[in-house]
Image (spheres, rainbow, N blue to C red):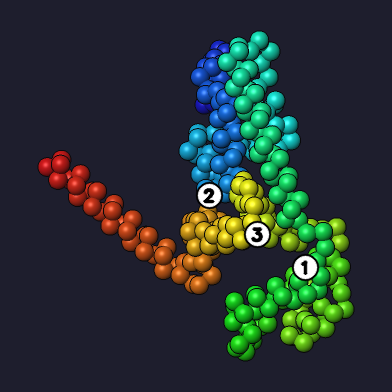
C-alpha cells in the first residue's frame, strides 16, 4: 500500500534539505579559480576533476562560465557583509592574477588566430597529412576526403585542381552550420585552453609545446568516450587487446582478494 504524504513527510524532507544545505562545502573564490584552471589545462577530464573535488559537473561548468564572463567578482560569491582587510588583500591578489590570466588568453589568441589562409597553406598541410598517413606512398582503396568550411581558401579553384590531381574528394559544411566540424573545433578549444596558459616569446617554444600536447593527448591521456583508451590505442587497433587484458587483470585481482579473505576468515 502506498503511504500517503502529509505535513510530517514534507517537514522531514525540508529538514533534510536544510541539513544538506548547511553542511554543503563552501568553496572560496581561490578554490573555484584553481578548479576551473585545472579543467582548462586539459590534463584530466572534467568528470575526473569533479569526482576528485566532490562537485557536480554542472557546478563546474557554471564556475567556468562565470570565470570567463564575469571573472573574480561573481566567483567571490554574493555575500553582502563587509570584508576584512585580509580578505580585501586576498581579493586584490586574485583579481590581479585573474586579469593576467585573461589577458594572456586574449593576447595569445590574437597572436595565434590567422586572419586568412592561402591555398598554399592548405595544400602544405594536406601534404604533411598524406605523408604521415602513408597515403602518398601506397595505393589505398578509399582515398581520404577533405571536410572543410566555406572559407575563401577552401572554395578556391586552385585548391579544387590540386585535390582533383590527388584524387581527394572535398566536402563542404553547410553555410552557417559550424557543428559540421564540431569535433575538430572542440579539439582546437582543448588545445588552446592548455597551450595559452603560458607565455611564449619564441615561435620554437610554442611549436614545441603544441607538439608535446599532441603527443600527450594522443598517446598518454585516457578518454572516457573511448572506454578509457588513448586515441593511439584505438587508431592502431590495440583497443580490444587492452580491454581484454584489463578484464583478465580484474578477474585475477578479484580472485586473489577472495582467496585472501577466505584465508583470513579460516
Above or below residue 12? Residue 124 is below
Asked whether 126 or 22 is in front, the reply is 126
* Residue situated furthest front in the rendering: 201
Q: Earlier in the sequence, mark 1 or mark 3?
A: 1
Q: Is residue 241 left or right of residue 224?
A: left
Q: Compute the Cα span from label 1 to label 2.
A: 28 Å
Graded by Cα atoms within 10 Å as few (under 14), some (14 to 19) or many (20 or more), the crowding at tag 2 reads some
Q: Which residue is mark 2?
A: 43
User: x and y percent of residue 221 in the render?
Assistant: 50, 56
Residue in the image at 62% along x and 28% along y = 94
Quadrant in the rendering for residue 173: bottom right
Q: Earlier in the sequence, mark 2 or mark 3?
A: 2
Q: Which residue is mark 3?
A: 203
Disc number lying in front (1 or 3) = 3
Against 117, residue 75 (above or below) is: above
In the rendered image of this protein, does residue 233 appear above or below residue 251? Answer: below
- Frontmost of labels 2 and 3 is 3
Asked which secondary structure carries label 2, the reply is loop
The residues tagged by marks 2 and 3 sit, at their Cα atoms, a distance apart of 23 Å
Circle 1 residues within 10 Å: few <14, some 14–19, many ≥20? some
In contact (CB < 8 Å): disc 2 and disc 3: no
- Secondary structure state at the residue bearing disc 3: helix
Where residue 232 appears, as percent x and y from the top left, is: 51, 66
Residue hosting label 1: 148
Amino acid at each position: 500500500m502506498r503511504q500517503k504524504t502529509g505535513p510530517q513527510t514534507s517537514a522531514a524532507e525540508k529538514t533534510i534539505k536544510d541539513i544538506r544545505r548547511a553542511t554543503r562545502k563552501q568553496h572560496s573564490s581561490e578554490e573555484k579559480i584553481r578548479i576551473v584552471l585545472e579543467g582548462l589545462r586539459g590534463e584530466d577530464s572534467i568528470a575526473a576533476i569533479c569526482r576528485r573535488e566532490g562537485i557536480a559537473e554542472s557546478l563546474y561548468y557554471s564556475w567556468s562560465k562565470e570565470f570567463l564572463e564575469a571573472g573574480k567578482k561573481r566567483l567571490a560569491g554574493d555575500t553582502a557583509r563587509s570584508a576584512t582587510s585580509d580578505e580585501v588583500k586576498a581579493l586584490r591578489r586574485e583579481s590581479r592574477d585573474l586579469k593576467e590570466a585573461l589577458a594572456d588568453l586574449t593576447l595569445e589568441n590574437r597572436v595565434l588566430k590567422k586572419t586568412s589562409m592561402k591555398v598554399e597553406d592548405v595544400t602544405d598541410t594536406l601534404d604533411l597529412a598524406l605523408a604521415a598517413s602513408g597515403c602518398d606512398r601506397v595505393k589505398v582503396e578509399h582515398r581520404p576526403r577533405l571536410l572543410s568550411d566555406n572559407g575563401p581558401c577552401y572554395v578556391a579553384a586552385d585548391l579544387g585542381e590540386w585535390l582533383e590531381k590527388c584524387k581527394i574528394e572535398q566536402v563542404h559544411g553547410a553555410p552557417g552550420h559550424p557543428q559540421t566540424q564540431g569535433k575538430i573545433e572542440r579539439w582546437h578549444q582543448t588545445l588552446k585552453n592548455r597551450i595559452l596558459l603560458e607565455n611564449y616569446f619564441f615561435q620554437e617554444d610554442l611549436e614545441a609545446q603544441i607538439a608535446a600536447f599532441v603527443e600527450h593527448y594522443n598517446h598518454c591521456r585516457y578518454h572516457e568516450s573511448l572506454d578509457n583508451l588513448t586515441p593511439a590505442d584505438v587508431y592502431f587497433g590495440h583497443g580490444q587487446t587492452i580491454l581484454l587484458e584489463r578484464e583478465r587483470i580484474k578477474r585475477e585481482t578479484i580472485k586473489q582478494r577472495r582467496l585472501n579473505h577466505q584465508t583470513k576468515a579460516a
